[in-house]
Image (tube, grey):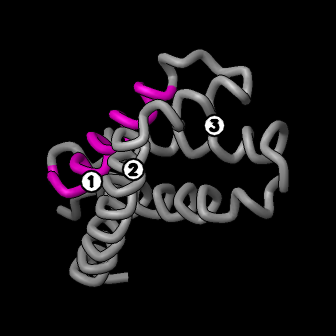
Amino acid sequence: MSPSTRNIIAWILQVLLGLALIASGGRKLMDLSGTVGMFSSLGLPAVLAYVVAIAEVLGGIGLLIPRFVRLAALGLIIIMIGAVVMHITKIPGGLGGGIPALVLLALLVVVLLLRRPQPTVV
């Protein structure tokens, strides 16, 4: 894949994922009491609801800033792994309800791979 094609695909994914995660984290922050209640019902500490909501917003913004793309993608991958695990183990409906988290996880891994440093050709 040529570097320009790789860059175009990466930017498209970064913008789509960034907007999706900003929206997701924003929804969690707008209904913070509901988010805390949901996290608590899963046996998770309430503070984790705040951490996840803020991390999704900041991570989504980070995906749109070239300097922070890899760090943002890595942090969001950790959050999405947690979301997938929660869907598999604790959330009614199992993995079927966790398909969006699984898709986000896969696309974040693709962004991380597309944005890995390329060896310089001499």
Which is more foreground, mark 2 or mark 3? 2
- The one nearer the camera, 112 or 33, is 33
- The one nearer the camera, 11 or 104, is 104
Which is more foreground, mark 1 or mark 3? 3
Which is more foreground, mark 1 or mark 2? 2
Q: Is residue 118 above or below residue 15?
A: above
The residue to which callout 1 is attached is 63
Q: Amino acid at mark 2?
A: Arg
At x 68% / y 64%, what residue is drawn?
Answer: 99
Give the mark nearer the N terminus: 2 vs 3: 2
Label at residue 27: 2
At x 44% / y 58%, what residue is drawn?
Answer: 113
Q: CA distance from mark 1 to mark 3?
A: 19 Å
Give the mark nearer the N terminus: 1 vs 2: 2
Crowding around mark 2 (Cα neighbors within 10 Å: few <14, some 14 to 19, many 20+) is some
Q: CA distance from mark 1 to mark 2?
A: 18 Å
Based on the picture, tell me whether residue 112 belongs to the magenta stretch: no
Measuring from the top left, give residue 47's x and y in whole percent. Answer: 48, 17
The residue to which callout 3 is attached is 82
User: Which quarter of the figure is the C terminus placed in?
Assistant: bottom left
Measuring from the top left, give residue 15's x and y in whole percent. Answer: 27, 68
Left or right: residue 106 versus residue 75 is right
Give the mark nearer the N terminus: 1 vs 3: 1
Q: Main secondary structure of the magenta part?
A: helix
Task: Identify the magenta region.
Answer: 49-66
Q: CA distance from mark 2 to mark 3?
A: 18 Å
